[in-house]
Amino acid sequence: MSAIEIGIKAHPGRRANHRTAANLGLMLLAFVVIASGVGSVEARPSFQTFLETLWPDAQALGVSRTTFDTAFRGLKPDRSLPDLVLGKKKKPDKVRQAEFVRAPRDYLNAKTLGKLAVTGRQLAKKHARVLGRIENEIGVDRYSVLAIWGRETSYGRYRLPHDAIRVLATQAYLGRRAELFRKELLYALKMLEEGVPRKKMRASWAGAIGMTQFLPTEYFKHAQALDGGRANLFDSVDDALASAAHQLKNKGWVTGQTWGYETVIPKSSSCALEGPPGVRPISEWIALGFKRVAGRKFPQKALADLAYLMSPAGAYGPSFLVFENFQVIRRYNTSDLYATFVGNLADRIAGSGNFVTPWKGSGRQRTDIISGVQQSLKDKGYPIGKVDGFIGSGTRRQVGQYQEKNKLPIDCWPTPGVLEHMRNS
């Protein structure tokens, strides 16, 4: 599942049938209100009025009035979802997505990964035929495809808790990223129009569906059975795995390349080198003193491959030299922890992958501290793109460089202590 930009408009040649001039006026008014209200309760139209504003764009996508009305009949927003803006004076509800709140050592729990790996090896044998076809015809290795399935729905054992239409309608109406979810809702309606049963469209809180968690727009871009045609992501393991592989390949998967190697940072360097800006060939990392853990050697064929340093817990856990396929996994779900989980699980299914460097107590990710650190760095001229409370390699890199510049212990982690230093300096 990945974030997708919005940009859908009604076809100029289409018109909303069965609508009176008064209702069209109401719809136009609702658009003005939404545009000017910035999510405040007083400015926001009613839920049903908001849903009606979707009709022209839904019709332009080929959704019939019957499908549209049936999907929304009696629908009410689910205000228990995370990431909603529920009032003028209330901040958006905190995201509960594990990638952005849990401590790295908890998210990348070795016991959890080990159990999933055992099941993954069993499933690799059970589905060997289709996995072989995926490798030969799409070019994505079987272990990575299985790891996506394992991370997303525990190999289909996790029952998604929400109705996709209600989730997407709520997020489009009340969500912090309303425009993104508006487009996803329109394509979910298109799925209904094309015959996907509503009861099959169970979703995460963010509207991802199926065994390998596709957003509706991703369903239309990447869902494909090996033998062609639209895939059944809900009941067919073969289709779900092939579609996950198609999505990875379409997002840039490099056939034959791994995701990364756990590495030892030399004493002459630090985690402040982390991130894509520091990308260089493996041979240059070796010249800087970087080595693989446990005395392992980098494969000769990888020496010319470009990699960057990635330390998901800063100095409080393992570090990795990661390749393009790590970035591709991040395009499936934009999180360093997610991509590390999938990559490491793939390694474990293949028979290796145990972390060598121990995890230490970085603590859970606190969005208030992270936001404060990001804003302080930005105020001091450090290249922080977005103050969002979500930690990634960019934030960790800049924290490390701030610590290095100010002669502080370098841990590359946004702690209360480093925030206090920034505010007092």
Image (cartoon, grey):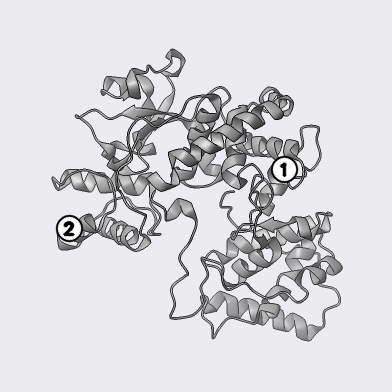
Q: Is residue 304 left or right of residue 288?
A: right
**Amino acid found under the numbered disc labelled 2:** His
Locate residue 160, reporting x and y percent.
Answer: 65, 55
Where 209 falls versus 173 (above or below)?
A: above
Q: Nearer the viewer, residue 259 or 234?
A: 234
Q: Nearer the viewer, residue 151 or 134?
A: 151
- Residue 396 can be seen, yes or no: yes
Reply above or below: 289 against 355: above
Residue 110 is situated, as x and y percent measured from the top left of the image, at: 44, 38
The residue that appears at 51% across and 80% down in the rendered structure is: 40
First in residue order: circle 1 vs circle 2: 1
Q: Residues within 10 Å of mark 1 (few under 14, many from 20)?
A: many
Q: Nearer the viewer, residue 127 or 26?
A: 127
- The residue indicated by pointer 1 is 223
Residue 293 location (% of width, % of height):
34, 24
Q: Amino acid at mark 1?
A: Ala
At x 70% / y 25%, what residue is drawn? 128
Q: Label 2 crowding class (10 Å Cα cut-off): few <14, some 14-19, many 20+? A: some
Q: CA distance from mark 1 to mark 2?
A: 49 Å
Q: Which residue is mark 2?
A: 421
Quadrant in the picture for residue 21? bottom right
Residue 350: image quadrant is: top right
199 with respect to 123 (left or right): right
Q: Residue at the spot x=37%, y=44% of the render?
A: 393
